[in-house]
Image (spheres, rainbow, N blue to C red):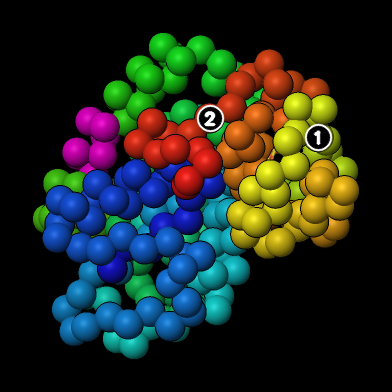
Amino acid sequence: MILYFSATGNSRHVAERIAEATGDVALSIEKSGNEIVLSEGETLGLVTPTNWWELPVLVRRFIRRMTVTCRPAYAFVVATYGSVAGAIGADAKRELAKRGISMNAAFGVKMPDNWTPIFDLSDPVRVAAINEKAERIIDTVIERIKTREQGNHIKYKMPHFVRWFTDPLLEHERQTKYFRVEDSCIGCGLCAAKCPVKAIEMRDKRPVWIVERCALCLGCLHRCPKFAIQYGNNTKEHGQYMHPAYNKVTF
Ligand SMILES: Cc1cc2nc3c(=O)[nH]c(=O)nc-3n(C[C@H](O)[C@H](O)[C@H](O)COP(=O)(O)O)c2cc1C
Ligand code: SF4
Ligand code: SF4
């Protein structure tokens, strides 16, 4: 079983490629429920974006409530990331251990960085080149999973204690006051319907952020059919992103 969370398709694509190559099943944590049914000798994989060098809020919450029916024979984590994945391997190892799961291996796949308040994804040629390079990294990760390789193989990894510094940064950025809606909004309600923490409500055909702290997945911003949602001052210029394997509206 390969579980994933994905806001813009990178982690889903990696999970689906691994599942296809290993004869396994890829399942979103938004659909899996909390009880993960594993059979004797089965592998458990978790594919996740990196958020502030650590696990995304939603993935951490999921691990903390997840139960597994049987200990996996091999457990791996794949972190997709845009620049530096940091402490996510150490973080995932600790969180899984609290649930009685021993993480055997962690791998990283560098992909387009959907944190567009900083990173610029407006050049389709550059974005396509990053995704093309990622395919070869995924090939390697698949081979390493097939041989049940052990250890944390994430590049430029950092120790768990960096979370002392990254946690406050993440908490600061999770405030919904940084979101705004432009006039191009057509009131379709997709952003509210698909927000994983129901932080958005439609009022007079306009999204309103009702929960002060969202999960900061940026799914609403990147999947809006009109690119009407912005966060801070730079996202409009930096472009919208969805992995080419998927359609942003039906994702
Ligand atoms: C809030 C937020 C924080 C992020 N922090 C990091 C980070 O610390 N390091 C990094 O390399 N990429 C970071 N990223 C980029 C994502 O991890 C990366 O684009 C990932 O592949 C997105 O996966 P998805 O398409 O499955 O959602 C961040 C993205 C978001 C939205
Ligand atoms: S998804 Fe975009 S267009 Fe649709 S309601 Fe939300 S902001 Fe408006
Ligand atoms: S409001 Fe947007 S960024 Fe926040 S959790 Fe919902 S979809 Fe993700």
The label on residue 181 is 1
Q: Can residue 117 be seen from the camera position used here?
A: no
The label on residue 57 is none
Give the x, y percent position of residue 153: 32, 46
**Front residue (pair 160, 28):** 28
Give the x, y percent position of residue 112: 47, 29
Residue drawn 20% across the image and 75% down it: 42
Residue drawn 22% across the image and 83% down it: 39
Please state which amino acid type lies under the numbered disc 2.
Tyr
Please state which amino acid type lies under the numbered disc 1.
Val
* Left or right, residue 165 beside residue 125: right
Q: Can residue 182 be seen from the camera position used here?
A: yes
Q: Which residue is mark 2?
A: 241
Q: The magenta stretch spans which residues?
A: 135-141
* Left or right, residue 120 beside residue 166: left
Q: SS of the residue at dot 1? A: strand
**Front residue (pair 184, 177):** 184
Asked if the stretch drawn in magenta spans residue 130, the answer is no
* Left or right, residue 25 beside residue 120: left
Q: SS of the residue at dot 2? A: loop
Q: Hey, which quadrant is residue 140 in on the image?
A: top left
